[in-house]
Image: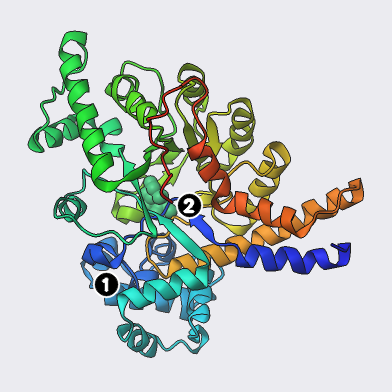
């Protein structure tokens, strides 16, 4: 294609390529109240809760004892009426409403509520996925969550556009409580993992738990979020469980083990879900994972800006490491742009540019619209630089690159055979996608 047409071509391809959104907190409507959507949910998103407490007016107690409608009223008033919605999370609300054909600037919350009240959940999901250009949605599935667990135990039928990920935070970060929960679920585990002889039985039971739940939910990968000072290997239960149960299980089933690194939970507990923060992570454990477990596949996203370059370089050293997403505090246009540029410069199109982390179905719209805007900008620059160097891309080449960045590289990573395993009977993690 002509250099002058590249702009339109890149824009058109980025805007029309379907996304595999590998990590969200969304559930399909079959999961009842766990499936969140609608104006009051969007307005009480925890990013906006954190923002509204920048301004005086209500105490934490007043806010949390109010109904969700009252909370949404307060956030709307403070962040959209009294002030301009300049933050990324606020702009997201505007983009979402606008894309749905609603006029947010009229500041008429009542009529917005009326519109949402008329929507049918399944049709609304279809509409959001279509507007967002999302073909598949990765969930976050925790057998340790009682409400969610009961849906799975009762054989919930899962919309096949949703992909399950087995989330293991309690198992790896809070073994004392997790071991009790496992016993309650009928697994014969001991809390004390220090003695090898005792550990053996426990480890086998943990593997049974992992296998049963991976089957039940049809998990495509396994996932944990980690604090900045997480160490591996160590004398902590997490290391015993990883080395003896989780990693062998992942290897046997060819499931990637995804780590989200750098979250300092509950910096301000009064903010509840909005109270988590970020600190720079020590990435040495990640190197240890890749070196010592070459037959495992690891996926990583880091929450701190200061970790991004080191993470890219580490990724370029290990074929069993896949970097994904601009997570949470990194999911802001300026940082996302820097990160995507750097990743392309250091890794080429071998990573997953973004995951939405949406908690509310409607948010798919803005998260992906804003991401695509960034991707267009970055790719246009990169192709322009390549043009100057003497390489003008063909349409099919641009399509291939965009597909890789929006989910294709992840699929390829999941499907790739392990370097040293010759066992053909092992099912591929995402073969049914
Ligand atoms: O741990 C996670 O998966 C995080 O994404 C969430 O805990 C966080 O609250 C969030 O929604 C970030 O976007
Ligand atoms: Zn998340």
* Residue 46 locus on image (x, y percent): 38, 60
Residue at screen point 71% across, 66% down: 11
Which of the two residues, 319 or 32, is positioned nearer the viewer here? 319
Residue 90 visible in the shown view: no
Tag 2 or tag 1, which sits nearer the N-term? 1
Residue nearest the viewer, comparing 41 with 241: 241
Residue that badge 2 annotates: 328
Decide if ligand 1 comes within 8 Å of the CB at mark 2: yes
Above/below status of 417 relative to 128: above
**SS assignment at label 1:** helix
Label 2 element class? helix
**169 shown above or below 234:** below
Mark 1: give few (<14), some (14-19) or many (20+) Cα within 10 Å: some
Q: Is residue 229 visible?
A: yes
Q: Quadrant of residue 27?
A: bottom left
Instruction: Identify the residue at horizontal 49%, vertical 89% (top origin).
Output: 106
């Amino acid at each position: 294609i002509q250099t002058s047409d590249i702009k339109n071509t890149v824009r058109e391809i980025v805007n029309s390529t379907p996304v595999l959104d590998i990590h969200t907190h969304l559930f399909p409507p079959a999961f009842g109240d766990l499936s969140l959507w609608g104006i009051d949910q969007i307005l009480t998103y925890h990013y906006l809760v954190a923002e509204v407490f920048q301004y005086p007016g209500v105490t934490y107690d007043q806010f949390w004892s109010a109904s969700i409608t009252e909370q949404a009223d307060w956030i709307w008033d403070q962040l959209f009426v009294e002030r301009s919605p300049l933050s990324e999370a606020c702009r997201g609300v505007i983009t979402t409403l606008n894309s749905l054909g609603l006029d947010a600037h009229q500041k008429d919350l009542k009529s917005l509520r009326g519109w949402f009240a008329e929507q049918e959940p399944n049709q609304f999901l279809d509409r959001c996925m279509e507007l967002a250009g999302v073909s598949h949605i990765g969930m976050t599935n925790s057998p340790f969550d009682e409400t969610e667990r009961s849906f799975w135990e009762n054989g919930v039928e899962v919309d096949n556009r949703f992909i399950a990920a087995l989330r293991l935070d309690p198992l790896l970060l809070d073994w004392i409580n997790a071991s009790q929960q496992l016993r309650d679920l009928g697994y014969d585990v001991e809390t004390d993992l220090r003695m090898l002889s005792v550990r053996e039985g426990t480890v086998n039971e943990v593997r049974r738990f992992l296998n049963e739940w991976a089957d039940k939910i049809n998990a495509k990968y396994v996932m944990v979020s980690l604090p900045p000072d997480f160490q591996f290997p160590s004398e902590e239960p997490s290391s015993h469980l990883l080395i003896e149960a989780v990693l062998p299980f992942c290897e046997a089933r060819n499931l990637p083990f995804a780590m989200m690194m750098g979250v300092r939970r509950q910096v301000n507990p009064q903010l509840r879900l909005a109270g988590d923060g970020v600190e720079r992570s020590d990435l040495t454990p990640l190197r240890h994972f890749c070196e010592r477990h070459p037959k495992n596949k690891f996926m990583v996203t880091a929450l701190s800006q200061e970790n991004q370059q080191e993470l890219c370089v580490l990724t370029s050293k290990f074929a069993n490491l896949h970097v994904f997403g601009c997570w949470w505090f990194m999911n802001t246009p300026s940082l996302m742009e820097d990160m995507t540029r750097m990743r392309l410069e250091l890794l080429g199109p071998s990573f997953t540019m973004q995951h939405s982390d949406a908690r509310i179905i409607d948010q798919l719209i803005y998260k992906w619209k804003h991401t695509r805007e960034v991707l267009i900008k970055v790719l246009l620059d990169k192709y322009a630089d390549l043009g100057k160097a003497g390489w003008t891309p063909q349409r099919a080449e641009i399509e291939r690159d965009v597909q890789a960045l929006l989910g294709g590289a992840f699929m390829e990573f999941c499907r790739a055979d392990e370097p040293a395993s010759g066992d053909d009977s092992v099912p591929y993690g995402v073969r049914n996608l």
